[in-house]
Image (spheres, rainbow, N blue to C red):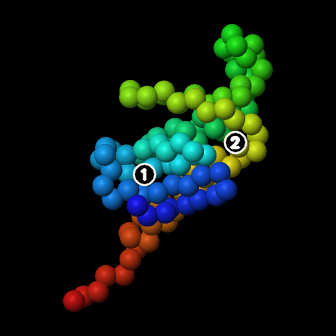
Amino acid sequence: MKLLYKNDYGATYRLSNSPNPACEMQLIIDTVGLFVSRADLAHLLEIVRKSNEPCSCQECGGNRCNKIWCANPLIDICLKVDEPILEKMADLIKGTQFMLDMDATLEQYRLKSDE
């Protein structure tokens, strides 16, 4: 595992031998490890960004929800959140995306030797 990005709430590691080839990273949030793909990261960031909007479920009654729900075909995830945690989660995801994009950009424009 190679550390991609970390903050005081979590970390993201690039996996060399992932149990699921589609999930190239492990996102550690608090004490939970999630195997994720780039698309999963983008989707989670969208959920985090929209978390300050009013929730229409019966439990929240139009107030802001204090949970992040994320579902995929294998598992549903529910994380209890507040404003400081949301900021840290957004930073963790955006920092990871930046590092991934930076690696791809550097690789794309890497000087190649003629040897």
| Residue that extends furthest to the top in the rendered view of this protein | 58
- Ranked by sequence position, the earlier of labels 1 and 2 is 1
Q: Residue at x 44, y 71 (%)?
A: 106
The reply to whether discs 1 and 2 touch (Cβ–Cβ < 8 Å) is: no
Residue situated in front as seen by the camera: 40 or 26: 26
Q: Position of residue 72 (x, y in %)?
A: 43, 29
Would you say residue 58 is visible in this rendering? Answer: yes
Residue situated in front as seen by the camera: 28 or 104: 28
Left or right: residue 3 compared with residue 81: left
- The amino acid type, in three-letter code, at marker 1 is Met
Q: Is residue 11 above or below residue 65?
A: below
Q: Residue at x 38, y 51 (%)?
A: 24
Q: Position of residue 34 (x, y in %)?
A: 47, 42
Q: Which mark is residue 52?
A: none
Q: Quadrant of the C terminus?
A: bottom left
Picture mark count: 2
Q: Residue at x 59, y 59 (%)?
A: 6
Q: Quadrant of the N terminus?
A: bottom left
Residue situated in front as seen by the camera: 75 or 112: 75
Left or right: residue 68 compared with residue 13: right
Q: Quadrant of residue 7?
A: bottom right
- The amino acid type, in three-letter code, at marker 2 is Leu
Q: Residue at x 38, y 28 (%)?
A: 74
Secondary structure, mark 2, is helix
The residue to which callout 2 is attached is 86
Cα–Cα gap, marks 1 and 2:
20 Å
Q: Is residue 56 above or below residue 23?
A: above
| Residue that extends furthest to the left in the rendered view of this protein | 115
Q: Which mark is residue 25?
A: 1
Left or right: residue 88 compared with residue 40: right
Q: Position of residue 75 (x, y in %)?
A: 43, 28
